[in-house]
Image (cartoon, coloured by chain):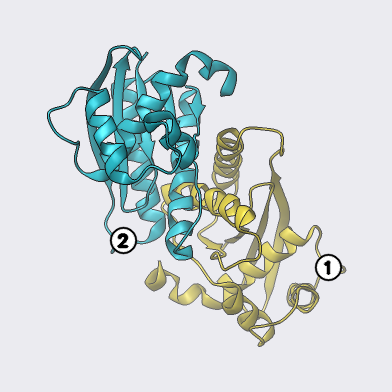
Chain colours: A cyan, B yellow
Amino acid sequence: MRILGIDPGLATIGMGLADGTIQEPCALEWLTIETKAGLPLAERLREIEDDLNAYLKEMQPELAVIEKLYFSVNEKTALDVAQARGVILATVARTGIPIIEPTPPELKSCITGDGSADKKQMQQMVKMLFRLDEIPHPDDAADALALAAFGLFQGKSASLIA
Amino acid sequence: MRILGIDPGLATIGMGLADGTIQEPCALEWLTIETKAGLPLAERLREIEDDLNAYLKEMQPELAVIEKLYFSVNEKTALDVAQARGVILATVARTGIPIIEPTPPELKSCITGDGSADKKQMQQMVKMLFRLDEIPHPDDAADALALAAFGLFQGKSASLIA
């Protein structure tokens, strides 16, 4: 099952594509969609929709794992991320593929066994799980691969959750 | 100039369509887009996009006025509204029409002269401005008409703001 993990953001959206099984997970690629801070918000959101649409069309994932919002230190940032996440959700929903939405503690717990794991622990586990030579960069892409791995673990029940 | 005011929300989106001039403003119609609480968030966002798209295509507004987020008592609600607002912004941006985004105090100040006006004062002014027989219902649609009126006041500079 080909799974796309998406770490929502406005300036940087992390994307991680994986397939294989829980026993043999395979990281196909990881990347980011980026938008420029100088542009009007509406333009940045439209760009996210266009870029994500093109990617979904090209890569044809069968399941999307989009991290849930969970907050937050900075309210302004939270609202920006939330607006971007809305566009991401609607864009993926349009393709008809199932979506699962773990919270950060659910994701951490699934990947490391510890719901309060820190960024470093998560990145190390992503590297180990996918047998990579290095921790994937940038951080947003590593987070997205963790989400894709979550999808591999949960994939069997995805049609029930979505 | 035909102006669409949009009051963002997840369960209820207020829409108010106006044209005319500041001297003779005309409320063409007001309505709401609604989504059901029981549906998955992604589905509700997709519905908002579909309904808004159809409306924009049919009514061809030349300017959209979309209220800015401004916060907030209830964080969960704020994040839901923000996710819906992202979809609304991206959908309108796709049509290419200019968008202006007043904050609630800017809107209140423009319509009533008082940046901290309450809901009742705003609704009374909307009724008077557009020479309506009654206060428009529901509240979200009245708010949207206030936004459209803001657009009439600001319309001349819209191409600069957008």
Q: Is residue B16 visible?
A: yes
Q: Are marks 2 and 1 in contact (CB under 8 Å)?
A: no
**Mark 2 lies on residue:** A39
In the rendered structure, the residue with mark 1 lies on which chain?
A: B
Residue A120, placed above or below residue B3: above
Q: Quadrant of the C terminus of chain A?
A: top right
Rendering quarter of residue B113: bottom right
Kind of element beneath mark 2: loop
B41 horizontally vs A135: left or right: right
B43 horizontally vs A80: left or right: right
Distance Cα–Cα, label 2 vs label 1: 38 Å
Please tell me which residue lies in front, A132 or B155: A132
Please tell me which residue lies in front, B117 or B93: B117
Tell me residue B32's x, y (percent): 71, 50
**Mark 1 lies on residue:** B135
Q: Is residue B8 visible?
A: no
Tell me what residue is drawn at x 45 percent, y 49 percent. B90
Residue B121, placed above or below residue B16: below
Tell me what residue is drawn at x 87 percent, y 68 percent. B134
Tell me residue A41's x, y (percent): 39, 59
Residue B160, placed above or below residue A158: below
Q: Residues within 10 Å of mark 1 (few under 14, many from 20)?
A: some
Q: Residues within 10 Å of mark 2 (few under 14, many from 20)?
A: few
Tell me residue A139's x, y (percent): 25, 44
Please tell me which residue lies in front, A11 or B117: A11
Labels 2, 1: front one = 2
